[in-house]
Amino acid sequence: MVSREEGSGTRGAFDGLIMEGAEVAPRAIVQDSNGAVREIVAGDRLSIGYISLGLVDERVKALVVDGVPATVENCRTGEYRLTRPFLFAYTGEMSKDTEDFLDFVLCIEGQEMLQGEGLVPAPEKSSD
């Protein structure tokens, strides 16, 4: 088992979605990045680990859960159950720069950039 370090967002999602309060085995290999986890798993056919979907490549396979493959679309619709949201947090009044940044991240160009990196795009805004 290859795991992320305590305090990582990926580890937090794994603990919440999979571990249900159980501890990761003390003999697990702990790494400080998703890329490092991928490299170890890619180099050992008997290992398993967890990484963000955007880092899955031809060297490692994503787990199929309940017959549902880990695709961007299945994550976006919620059909693939092993997903977590990405949140922006701030304090105080939102500055113009912050608004501009969020507008860019959520615009078509920003979403295409994120999807190009293998990340799941934000849900489309409803026209209600």
Image: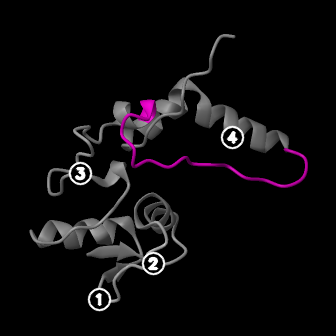
Provide the major secondary structure of the magenta segment.
Answer: loop
- Above or below for 119 versus 35: above
Per the image, the residue denoted by label 1 is 27
**Disc 4 versus disc 3: distance between alpha carbons?**
34 Å
Its colouring scheme is one colour
**Disc 4 versus disc 2: distance between alpha carbons?**
29 Å
Residue interval drawn in magenta: 76-94
Quarter occupied by the N terminus: bottom left
- Above or below for 99 versus 82: above
Q: Position of residue 69 (x, y in %)?
A: 25, 39
Q: Depth-wise, is mark 4 or mark 3 nearer the camera? A: 3
Per the image, the residue denoted by label 3 is 63
Q: Measuring 18% from the left and 53% from the top, which residue is drawn there?
A: 61
Among numbered discs 2 and 3, the one appearing first in the sequence: 2
Residue 104 sits in which quadrant?
A: top right
Q: Depth-wise, is mark 2 or mark 3 nearer the camera? A: 3
> CB of mark 4 within 8 Å of CB of mark 3?
no
* Labelled disc at residue 101: 4
Per the image, the residue denoted by label 2 is 5
